[in-house]
Amino acid sequence: MKTITALIQREYLEHKGAFLYAPAVILGLLTLVLLTATGIDRPRLPTGIAVNSGKVVEVAFLAVAALWFVYLLAALFFYFADAFNADRRNNAMLFWKSMPVSDFTVLGAKLLAGLTIFPALILVAVLINAVLLVVFALFTAWQLPGMVPPDLLTVLGAGGQVGLFAIVSMLLALLWYAPFFAWVGMLSTLVGRWSIPLAFLIPGMIGLFEKLTFGAGDFDRGYFLTWIGERLHFGLDRELFADEFLTPTRFEAVPAVARLLTVVDWTQFFGGLAVAMLLVYAASEYRRRFIAA
């Protein structure tokens, strides 16, 4: 366990720029923008519009979590496109370069770091971002005579409900996308940073081969690319979820999580995890046999 912890710590130290410093810069710029908007441009509320402050907080929290999740997916893609190949660099001064662990343990720790510590850092950014929005909402409410500022209980309740749903859905989504991360990681072991274009080019070539061989002249994507497109989709139907979320009633995390669990294809879910582990194992075997320590 101490070995895994040390390896995860190494990943944090080597890649904290994308998961710690970059989010900090984004939050700093956002703070500057909100301060500028509050101090210079007086917000206006259209006449005849009733504002439910609790619902505004819920929608704002959800939007913040969704945007940061998109950032997390992009950052993890580039992380895995580099991390599995990073040990080829000359970093022999670090004690863990010569740790007596297997290549599968090293690469498994990289996958684990990408699914645990880095998402946790982004969740901290989500929390800070939510606090900034609440402060901005209070300033805005004071400047708008027709808007009642949200009280502390409303903010905590909405934040807790949305936060619980965001954490569960983010965890499930990361595990759902694990085979894609492992795929680009395995390519990184083989070809380095060329894994970024090849991660898309190889499935595209497979889909093109299927079309040329079995397509019969139609213009659909074929079975393989259709399956990839469906596999990339995770979660509740976006339009249905948006309609439910924007109703006047308060958002409840437990029913939303229950609905999410019912729409997950658990066969594909656990099958994808098995494929991810097989890809990591294949990368570790290639690393053990063909890459000098």
Image: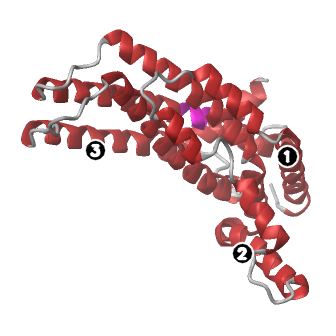
The figure's colour scheme reads secondary structure
Q: Quadrant of the N terminus?
A: top right
| Residue 202: quadrant of the picture | bottom right
Say which of 174 and 145 sits in front. 145
Horizontal arrangement in the rendering, residue 46 relative to residue 86 (left or right) = left
For the record, the magenta segment spans 116-121
Image location of residue 3, percent across then percent down: 77, 29
Q: What is the CA distance from the residue labelled 1 to the residue labelled 2? A: 23 Å
Q: Amino acid at mark 2?
A: Leu
Residue extending farthest top: 153
Q: Nearer the viewer, mark 1 or mark 2?
A: 1
User: Horizontal placement of 102 versus 158: left or right?
Assistant: right
* Structural distance between the alpha carbons of marks 1 and 3: 40 Å
Label located before the other in sequence (1 or 3): 3
Question: What secondary structure is the stretch in magenta mostly built from?
Answer: helix
- Where residue 201 is drawn, which disc sits there? 2
Identify the residue position indicated by label 3 in the image. 29
Q: Secondary structure at mark 3?
A: helix
Q: Is residue 107 above or below residue 167?
A: below
Residue at 56 percent of width and 39 percent of height: 241
In magenta stretch: residue 25: no
Image location of residue 13, percent across then percent down: 56, 39
Distance from disc 2 to disc 3, alpha carbons, whole Å, reads: 35 Å
Q: Label 1, on which residue?
A: 268
